[in-house]
Amino acid sequence: MTTAPGAAQRLSRMIQIPTVSAEISERGSAPFEQFITLLEELYPGVHRHLERERITELGLLFRWRGADASLDPAVLMAHFDVVPVDPSDAWTYPPFDGQIADGFVYGRGALDDKGPLLVVLEAVESLLSEGFTPARDVYLSFGGNEETFGDAARTIAQTFIDRGITPWLVLDEGGAVVDAPLPLVRGLAAMVGVGEKGAMTVRLSARGDGGHASAPPARTAVARVARAVSRLSPGTFPARTPAGVTRMLEHFAARRGPAQRLYRLLAARPWLTARVFSRLGGEPAAMVRTTVAPTMFEGGSAANVLPSQASATVNLRVAIGESVAGTAERLRRRIADRKVKVDVLEGEDPSPESATDNAQFALIATAVHASHPAASAVPYVMMAATDSRHFHRFTPAVYRFAPLAMSSELRATIHGVDERVAIDELERGTRFHRALITGLGVAEPRP
Ligand SMILES: [Zn+2]
């Protein structure tokens, strides 16, 4: 298959359209319209054979009718908006030039998420040209405001609910094919997100009597809120190992390497994993418990005036298995001060965990074998949110994985400088989706 050079050109053209959702009020929606028109030009087969709906201003939903209408569909998701570029950053090539050099396509969105979007379309277009019909319906769900937590994907998910359609499989961005995924683990792994944490923002506030600072009360509003914040520590929330983390450890326990015994030990003892990971801090700790980060503090108006009120904003990432409501309750109990109000400003529950012993995960693993034979599919849980969160409430099989290999150096370019994707990976990613789509028929046992 020689899709890569053409695919690289097509990705370059996608990158040249600055679909920066955070700047839509300054740039206007013209780039987004231009992008949608570009897709029509680049993928004529897709636009001829699939039904396209525009759902909200920035949502695209394509339907490819499958051979058997009684089977639930597969939904392949991606987003075509990108994050802004910091003008003070020095890029090797300008971020919206789509420069092709040294085997890479450079530019904002190359990995997040125009590259992953492109490989879906490349696969569908090539299968269409061969006259292929999928066994079940395949939907392509593309949103233009993922990075700004917009409504496109949410409304598309609601459209499925309204039509009484429960997808058999949903696949969105998230994990990737990575090298050395955990300390002391060797080799490639295709990290497939089987769950994602929730997020919430909470305001802690207190009122004081005000007055002159020369005769202060025992505790001012600022001191009260500060004390509340200081009562929140990493240990505020219990550590618990999600099933997805245990499955991940089981996987690595089966691999030869310096840490094989350690991973074997942990895989068999989720309680120990919870303890070890929470002690490690950072990412491992974030995998096993709710994190809490005070981000803003406000109070007082002058150096010599007692503040009549003070507040702190706290950002939390809610662990899998917990809830926004339960987390707020735990905050109140831990702060233990009725004069501190705890208001949840926004909250999104964590996802349930998708299974790894089902036909859907097996199909993803098969497709990984087709695209990246040296890697195996390994489940994990994500700390960040994806658009697929709008589906997991009514769809049991939601997975988060982009079929592109990314070194840690490349992963750091996402939302950063010199974002780029290897041209070879565009070909592999296309192969992944071809294998996934052509494998959709062999899965479900008929009732
Ligand atoms: Zn993204």
Image (cartoon, grey):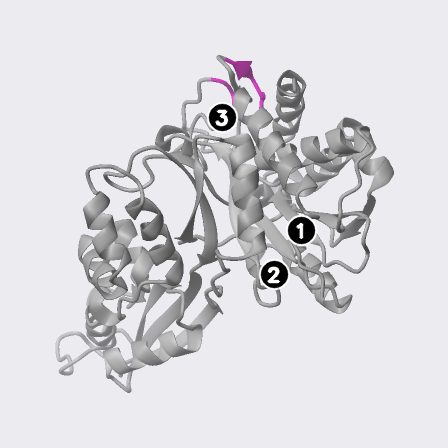
Q: Which residues are magenta?
A: 93-101
User: Where residue 33 sits: x, y (%)?
Assistant: 75, 38
Q: Which residue is mark 3?
A: 420
Q: Is residue 187 above or below residue 98?
A: below
For marks 3 and 1, the one nearer the N-term is: 1
Horizontal arrangement in the rendering, residue 130 relative to residue 82 (left or right): right
- Name the front one of labels 3 and 2: 2
Q: Is residue 274 above or below residue 231?
A: above
Most extreme residue toward the right is 48
* Secondary-structure class at tag 3: strand
Is 12 or 261 nearer to us in this picture?
A: 261
User: Where residue 185 sits: x, y (%)?
Assistant: 28, 38
- Name the front one of labels 3 and 1: 1
Q: Is residue 176 above or below residue 209?
A: above
Q: Quadrant of residue 121?
A: top right
* Labels 3 & 1 near each other (Cβ < 8 A): no
* Secondary-structure class at tag 1: strand
For marks 2 and 1, the one nearer the N-term is: 1
**Label annotation for residue 75:** 1
Is residue 84 visible to us here?
Answer: no
* Secondary-structure class at tag 2: loop
Q: Residue shown at 40%/65% (left/top)? A: 320
Q: Which residue is mark 2?
A: 391
Is 17 or 237 nearer to us in this picture?
A: 237
Callout 1 environment at 10 Å: few (<14), some (14 to 19), or many (20+)?
many
Horizontal arrangement in the rendering, residue 303 relative to residue 162 (left or right): left
Most extreme residue toward the bottom is 338
Q: Residue shown at 57%/62% (left/top)? A: 392
Q: Residue 228: say if magenta.
A: no
Q: Residue shown at 24%/49% (left/top)? A: 263
